[in-house]
Amino acid sequence: MVGVKAPMDDPIVVTRIGDGVYRVERDGRNEIVYVAGSAGDTWAFWNGQVFRGSFAEPSQDRPRAPRAKTTQSLTAPMPATVIKVLVHPGEAVKKGDILVILEAMKMELPIRAPADAIVAAVHCRAGDLVQPETTLIDLA
């Protein structure tokens, strides 16, 4: 569901930001949706509500278009101060590597790579105060 858009009169962009976690952008607002389950029995948690649905598997008769190279943005989970940025654009990272260390409520919070990737961009530096959903790192 990376980069899914609705018709132009009502643009919605859905970006996968982690396993079962999606950012939905609409009308200048960002919201997080959590998804779990299988293709035949999917659960979504959004805005304090749970939704359940069933989705058919994609047809095997039709060839799929090649997947476009996408970026994944890692965002701040809460208001925090950037303590240390451990990566630079162009650097290869492995799943679980610590990319940024935040401090919130006197606790350190490491932001880790969700998968093997290349750092596409760094949007923060040590000392920055960040708000929830502020993009810290883009991975490709």
Image (cartoon, rainbow, N blue to C red):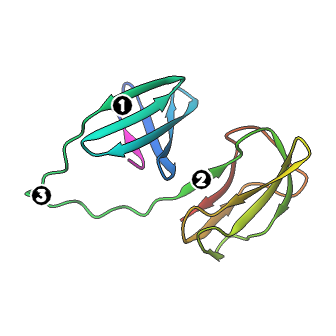
> Where does label 1 land, which residue?
8
Q: Which mark is residue 80?
A: none
Amino acid under disc 3:
Gln
> Where does label 3 land, which residue?
60
Q: Is residue 118 left or right of residue 33?
A: right
Q: Is residue 69 left or right of residue 42?
A: right
Query: CA separation, marks 3 and 1?
Result: 28 Å
Task: Determine whether label 1 and label 2 are within 8 Å by CB.
Answer: no
Look at the image and tell me whether residue 133 can be seen: yes
Q: Main secondary structure of the magenta part?
A: loop
Q: Which residues are magenta?
A: 1-5
Query: CA separation, marks 1 and 2?
Result: 23 Å
Q: Earlier in the sequence, mark 1 or mark 2?
A: 1
Residue drawn at point x = 59 percent, y = 53 percent: 73
Taking 25 as reference, is 134 above or below it?
Answer: below
Query: CA separation, marks 2 and 3?
Result: 31 Å
SS for dot 3: loop
Amino acid under disc 2:
Ser
How many neighbours does mark 3 have within 10 angstroms: few (below 14), some (14-19), or many (20 or more)?
A: few
The quarter of the displayed image where residue 132 is located: top right
> Where does label 2 land, which residue?
73
Residue drawn at point x = 85 percent, y = 62 percent: 84
Question: Whole-percent x and y of residue 64?
Answer: 20, 60
